[in-house]
Structure formats: structure tokens, C-alpha cells
Image (cartoon, rainbow, N blue to C red):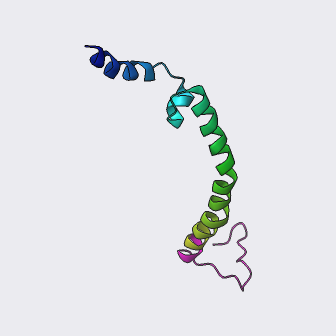
């Protein structure tokens, strides 16, 4: 019977963990602290990856599916003209 109680205890204990610990998948406060520092350490690299690789990829997709000429000036549309 003691082994049955040990199997049920972690499920009950996990619902009483703080939301941040559940978010990072930590069981203790020390694990939560270490996980948050890990995410903070990786954050500049992830933002750089999104900005320097994702941005140009999205821009090339936009320019690839639009009629855009880099060498000629943009067309001027004045009020009243079509």
C-alpha cells in the first residue's frame, strides 16, 4: 500500500507547484531558478536568430511575391489620379 501512496503523491504535488515552475518543468525552486537563468542566457541568441535570419527570409518572401523594383523610383500617386 505504501507504494501506491508514492505513485499518487507526485501528481498531487505537481498541481501545487507555482505556475512558473510548471512552465519550465522544474520540481524544486533551485531547478526553477536554474532553468530561468538558462532561458535568460539563451534569449539574446534566440532574438538574434529571429531578427537576423527570420527578418531577411520574411522580407525576401514579401519582395518575391510583389512587384517591386529596386532600381526605379517608386510611383507617385496624387490625389484624384488613378
Q: Main secondary structure of the magenta part?
A: loop
Q: Residue at x 66, y 40 (%)?
A: 37
In this rendering, is residue 23 above or below 51? above
Q: In the visual, does 56 lie left or right of 28?
A: right
In which quadrant of the rendered image does the N terminus lie?
A: top left
Q: Quadrant of residue 47?
A: bottom right
Residue 22 placement (x, y as % from top left): 50, 30
In which quadrant of the rendered image does the C terminus lie?
A: bottom right
Is 78 in the magenta? Answer: yes
In this rendering, is residue 33 above or below 16? below
Where are the magenta residues, as a range? 62-82
Q: Residue at x 73, y 70 (%)?
A: 78
Residue 54 placement (x, y as % from top left): 60, 64
Q: Residue at x 59, y 32 (%)?
A: 32
Could you say which is closer to the camera, residue 16 or residue 49?
Answer: 16
Is 59 in the magenta? Answer: no
Could you say which is closer to the camera, residue 82 or residue 24?
Answer: 24
Residue 3 placement (x, y as % from top left): 29, 19
Total of numbered circles in the picture? 0
Name the residue at the bottom extreme. 71
Could you say which is closer to the camera, residue 22 or residue 71?
Answer: 22
Name the residue at the front extreme. 2
Q: Residue at x 53, y 36 (%)?
A: 24
Q: In the visual, does 26 lie left or right of 5?
A: right
In this rendering, is residue 33 above or below 66? above
Residue 81 placement (x, y as % from top left): 67, 72
In this rendering, is residue 79 above or below 19? below
Name the residue at the left extreme. 1
Q: In the visual, does 53 lie left or right of 74?
A: left
Q: Quadrant of residue 77?
A: bottom right
Amino acid at each position: 500500500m505504501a507504494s501506491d501512496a508514492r505513485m499518487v503523491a507526485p501528481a498531487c504535488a505537481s498541481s501545487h507547484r507555482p505556475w512558473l515552475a510548471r512552465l519550465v518543468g522544474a520540481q524544486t525552486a533551485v531547478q526553477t531558478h536554474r532553468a530561468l537563468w538558462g532561458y535568460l542566457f539563451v534569449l539574446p541568441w534566440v532574438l538574434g536568430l529571429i531578427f537576423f535570419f527570420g527578418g531577411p527570409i520574411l522580407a525576401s518572401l514579401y519582395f518575391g511575391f510583389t512587384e517591386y523594383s529596386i532600381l526605379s523610383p517608386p510611383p507617385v500617386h496624387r490625389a484624384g489620379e488613378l
